[in-house]
Amino acid sequence: MNPSLHQQTTTMPVQIDDCWNRIGVRGDGSCTQLALHIDCRNCPVHARAAAELLDRLQVEDLSHYWEQQAEDEQQDGTDLKSLLLFRIGDEWLALPTVLFEEVTELRPVHGLPHQKNATVLGIANIRGALVTCVSLAAMLGITGVGQRTRSQETAARLLVVRRHGQATAFNADEVYGTLRVASTAHRPVPTTLARGAGHFAHAVIHWNGHSVGLLDEELLFHTLDRSLHD
């Protein structure tokens, strides 16, 4: 493996059963449930551990706990940054893992009246909350996104991101999971990346024979915000 690309290896308090650090995305990846849940944060075991943690920590201390985890990752030997890798059409893309609130199965999307912006698809019910769904394919100009086969439909996921308190969801045709990447692995954006996706990417990494576009989160969410308010 490229020395600039690493699995995540972080420790948590011993009283919490941190199986995600041993056999999950931050461990050796041997957990049989990873194929189903993609990321440990979507697993009921992780949810129960989080509930235990909530019982032990004051609410105001919880954000500090996760901030400390992020700081620990940044200080872990190099400038490693955790990214979530996903595919839309033929393009592999990535965003910082910290932006993602949930990776789940596809949901029915209900269109909004008088909405003409192709980026905004509508709203979906996710765990009782109405979340705006957008099309990154439309915004990034990615072509070749159409009807999926049954196996492709099984691989597709709905990704929920949260930034500045605002939750937004988008479909991905496939989700690989998380990868820790050093800035030394970044490469210039090639002209072969779809024109729109290339515009929104600040760099690429080479992974499993693919060029993965690292999306510029500031530009991406600024454009999404403008689309939502058009």
Image (spheres, rainbow, N blue to C red):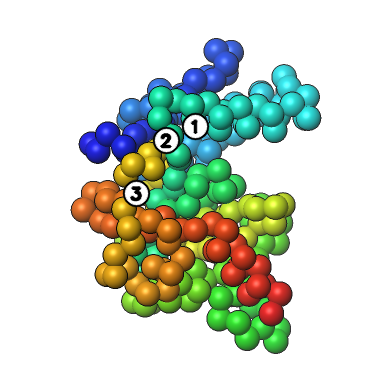
Q: Position of residue 164 (x, y in %)?
A: 70, 52
User: What is the quadrant of residue 120 in the picture?
Assistant: bottom right
User: In this figure, which residue is indicated by the disc labeled 2?
Assistant: 80
Of mark 3 and mark 1, the one earlier in the sequence is 1
Relative to 203, is 88 above or below? below
Residue 186, numbered label: 3
Q: Position of residue 24 (x, y in %)?
A: 41, 31
User: How would you rate the neighbour count of disc 2 (Cα within 10 Å): few for under 14, some for 14-19, many for 20 or more?
Assistant: many
At horizontal 32% and vertical 68% (from top left) the residue drawn is 193
Name the kind of residue labelled 1 in the image.
Gln
At horizontal 31% and vertical 53% (from top left) the residue drawn is 187
User: How would you rate the neighbour count of disc 3 (Cα within 10 Å): few for under 14, some for 14-19, many for 20 or more?
Assistant: some
Of mark 1 and mark 2, the one earlier in the sequence is 1
Q: Nearer the viewer, residue 146 or 211?
A: 211
Q: Nearer the viewer, residue 180 or 176?
A: 180
Q: CA distance from mark 3 to mark 1?
A: 16 Å
